[in-house]
Amino acid sequence: MATIRDVANLAGVSVATVSRVLNNNGYVHEDTRKKVVQAINKLDYKPNAVARSLYKKTSKSIGFIIPDITNPFFPQLVRAVESFFVEEGYTILLFNSDEELEHELKILEIMESKYVDGILIVSNTIGKDQLEHLSIPVVAIDRVIDETIPTVSIDNYHGAREAVRLLLKKGCRNIAHIRGPENVHTAEERLKGYLDEMKAHSLPTFVYVGNYELKTSMLTTMKLLSENAGIDGVFAGNDVMAVGAIKAASKLGIAIPKELKIIGFDGIELAEAITPELTTMEQPILKLGKKSGELLLKLIQGEPLITKHVTYHAKLVERNST
Amino acid sequence: MATIRDVANLAGVSVATVSRVLNNNGYVHEDTRKKVVQAINKLDYKPNAVARSLYKKTSKSIGFIIPDITNPFFPQLVRAVESFFVEEGYTILLFNSDEELEHELKILEIMESKYVDGILIVSNTIGKDQLEHLSIPVVAIDRVIDETIPTVSIDNYHGAREAVRLLLKKGCRNIAHIRGPENVHTAEERLKGYLDEMKAHSLPTFVYVGNYELKTSMLTTMKLLSENAGIDGVFAGNDVMAVGAIKAASKLGIAIPKELKIIGFDGIELAEAITPELTTMEQPILKLGKKSGELLLKLIQGEPLITKHVTYHAKLVERNST
DNA sequence: TTGAAAGCGCTAACAG
DNA sequence: CTGTTAGCGCTTTCAA
């Protein structure tokens, strides 16, 4: 690999001059510029990003921590984030944390030592303390970690209420909720929305704990259906669990949506792939990704954030499961 | 951020000594080591990976190019690769190429300038020429790029034959194939397998071109069913298209598997999420990821590769669509 | 308009 | 066992 020195020698100039044409700053005579460019081409010279990083204390890279890329919610988010930052000349370092705090902390250390310019994180486990002392800008996605740290998320509470409202409108009266894991912020909010909406209509509530996974949800649905006669609607805490609920109904020979109506939350692609297609509260996943990229970039560039917290709304998408 | 010099000053030793305790090489007296360790802790010092990279010409990072993380085949692959390399102390730079050559080449340049230690790539578009002159070890996954470059893939040809054989065994005689995009290696191999197996049984062939996507495949299936009476089996080039075929059948009111049997290829999680669950030729995706990691790591460490090409076999997983 | 030289933080000879 | 020093490849004063 050719270095800046090789280019300088070949062009018969100093490295400083080469650096100037590389970065397009400072004065450099048109003739010398040409010589330098020629040398660059001839040697197929590419500036060494590591050396540059060392000096500039910036790496043109973003660290992105997600729980698990295998969870269908994240591929789209990652894609949106990556697209945004590639445009801006940044590279994405991707880490799966499995929501394990210890792992997350290790990742944070790696990021510090690698001089990442900014951090994007989706986590329930991490707290503001571990993030604040970081000296690297951070934006949280999907889950609010703390008032002080910038966040892009959606209004889970009202989304949940709207989901329940649809079931109500469709005639359901005995609506069960399969909630996401305890202590997970999104799951708690959605639960609260369900509870409040049901209470507002003086209807009974049926809450079962799921873990945002398909198989467990299928089993849970079977259980909840056998334990409670007359359930005519299910609001699942996310789409994956809703799909599990649909599978359960189909195994039990229960007709959807005639006998049982099911609504999910998230708007992942899977919702459209299955039969019947799943009605869901669709999150603007791409927007989440893009907006969090924008906030982080501003932070990196030292601009102040007017609003630290951006909240989007989930949109009802009616399909065939209701 | 504290530097090695700060640590040295605080501990009252030279930077060399600090470096020695950091890297655990060379002699250093137990007492001095202790002083250094204390200073490190006191300052919460983390070695600067960028500076280290510059000197060692290695970055402890791996570049990974995939077409699109949004394609359900890749999350699992990425996860497997990431898990493997995290263990080994490497970081993953993830890039989506959309299979665009121009984009792939730009990514390669970025990787060179960032001193990535190794490259993993899934691509149909790139050729050996652009990879060979690279001076960074490369391992191709899923698709053979060239004899000369190490590859981990599966035997698509025989997998396809086995898929067709199952349909045959189940009594199908008019089996259609929705193939993947033209010029895509995996798609060509699977097509060849289908053709040869059908020919071996002197059965007619029906080939339609898909693009590995769900919606197109659904439309294509409708078309193929309307154009050819008596189709009783469909071998889809991948699971996503098989799901599309199932949706088409369900829209048309065709019973699966009674009237029409469908088999896919890949073994993605979606196959199990839908109803009826999809029979498929399951690829050992995790193994693919792990093995390619192993090969790349050997290459990085300068060990010779005994076998440049590792081929796995897809495994028939019978579910309810056949 | 250009070059010399210092230095980003670290590692690895080389002396001592 | 420890310190001095020369880089890794680049950017940026400071002079010329």
Image: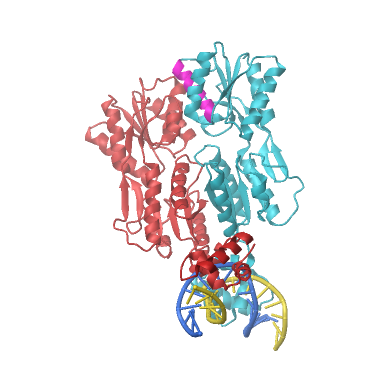
Chain colours: A cyan, B red, C blue, D yellow
Residue extending farthest to the top is A229
**Residue B277 place in picture, x, y as percent:** 41, 27
Task: Give the quarter of the image for residue B120.
Answer: bottom left
Residue occupying image coordinates x 54% and y 77%: A5
**Residue A136 place in picture, x, y as percent:** 65, 55
From where the camera sits, is residue A63 visible? Answer: yes
- Quarter the N terminus of chain B occupies: bottom right
Residue B17 lies within the magenta run? no
Residue extending farthest to the right is A306
Residue occupying image coordinates x 36% and y 22%: B257
Q: As rendered, which of A46 and A235 lies closer to the eye?
A: A235
Q: As rendered, which of B138 and B97 lies closer to the eye?
A: B138
Question: Is A233 situated above or below A80?
Answer: above
Residue A248 lies within the magenta run? yes
From where the camera sits, is residue A49 visible? Answer: no
Q: As rendered, which of B275 and B262 lies closer to the eye?
A: B275
Which secondary structure type mostly characterizes the magenta part of the structure? helix
Question: Is A169 situated above or below B7?
Answer: above
Residue occupying image coordinates x 47% and y 28%: A215
Question: Is B22 situated above or below A258?
Answer: below
Tag count in the figure?
Answer: 0
- Quarter the C terminus of chain B occupies: top left
Q: As rendered, which of A119 and B148 lies closer to the eye?
A: A119
Residue A265 placement, left or right of B217:
right
Residue B118 placement, left or right of A318:
left
Residue B225 placement, left or right of A102:
left
Instruction: Report the magenta residues as a range.
Output: A240-252
**Residue B176 place in picture, x, y as percent:** 34, 31
Question: Is B136 situated above or below B122?
Answer: below
**Residue B6 place in picture, x, y as percent:** 63, 68
